[in-house]
Amino acid sequence: MSTQPIHIQAGFTEGEKPAFFVRFSPADAVPRAHVIYLPPFTEEMNRCRAIAAGQARRFARQGMSCTLLDFHGTGESPGETTDATLPIWYNNISEIYDSLVNEAHVPVHLWGCRLGALIAANYLTNRAITCDALLMWQPIAAGKPYATQVYRQRLAALIERGGAAETTTTIRERLANDEVVEIGGYSLGGPLMLAIDELDMASISRAPAKRVFWLEHSSDGDLLPNPRSAKAISHLSNLGAETKHIAFTGAPIWQLHERATCDSLLEQTEALPL
């Protein structure tokens, strides 16, 4: 790894619903490409912060700038989670993306982790822009199964406390009625969560990028994608994206409460032709 010095800049986007960002870039050279990182959601975001920052430094030492984004209402950004909607988040991405495109005529890549990967794919499809590469770390292939897993955290906590019985269906009904649902210390609102339900990598209408790198964890050494991932990868390929599945091993960072790293994921990412 190069020891090239890195410049670090923090700030906020300038829109009506601003988002916090940190940008890592080569200190003594014009970046040869830009990378925008879209994070996971709720506690997964916190668990992946350290490894994302480490990867951003790696990108900078490879001659690229990397902007780590906290969506409005999350992380260090203003607002509350209940204020967040997908259109607001898409606008946060656009504010960063457009500023980078105007800054220099070099490729702009999107990099999403977990839910951030699903959001990245849908953003690129809906905006109909040409992105050179989409890098996805352990992507969520479909929003509804993911949201159901989030709701089950609340059900488990209610059972442990002896609280009133709920189901994932009743949680969705509450959200549809504009109620706020507390899950794992986060206040979640219907506009965002019900929109996440509708996201599905296997049903997007156009290729999100020329090249898609799908990095997925393998706990047993199996190099093949899981069935849901395989369906999405096939769909992206059929849309014309050059889609590559890459298995990695090591710690599943997004699941761990204690700080950890994953050398296999970092090494596989560093080897990508970005």
Image (spheres, rainbow, N blue to C red):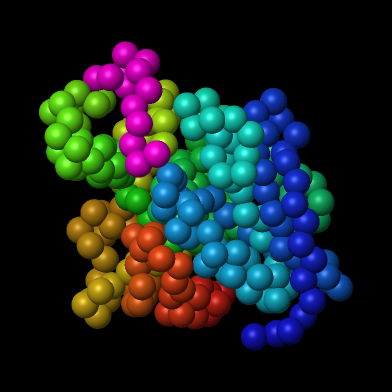
Q: Position of residue 266 (x, y in %)?
A: 50, 75
2 above or below 72?
A: below
Which residue does the image show at 35% across and 67% down from the upper left?
252
Q: Position of residue 103 (x, y in %)?
A: 81, 51
Q: Is residue 99 magenta?
A: no
Describe residue 108's horizontal placement relative to residue 101 as left or right: left
**Viewer-nearest residue: 42 or 200:** 42
Q: Splitting the image into 4 quarters, where does residue 219 fall?
A: bottom left
Q: Position of residue 200 (x, y in %)?
A: 33, 41
136 above or below 171?
A: below
Which residue does the image show at 62% across and 39% down from the upper left?
77
Describe residue 4's horizontal placement relative to residue 223 as left or right: right
Q: Position of residue 81 (x, y in %)?
A: 49, 32
**Viewer-nearest residue: 226 or 158:** 158
Q: Splitting the image into 4 quarters, where does residue 178 fall?
A: top left
Q: Quadrant of the N terminus?
A: bottom right
Residue 214 visible in the snapshot: no
**Viewer-nearest residue: 214 or 65:** 65
Q: Is residue 184 magenta?
A: yes
Report how many numbered discs are placed on residues in the image: 0
Query: Which region is colored magenta?
Result: 173-185
Residue 66 visible in the snapshot: yes
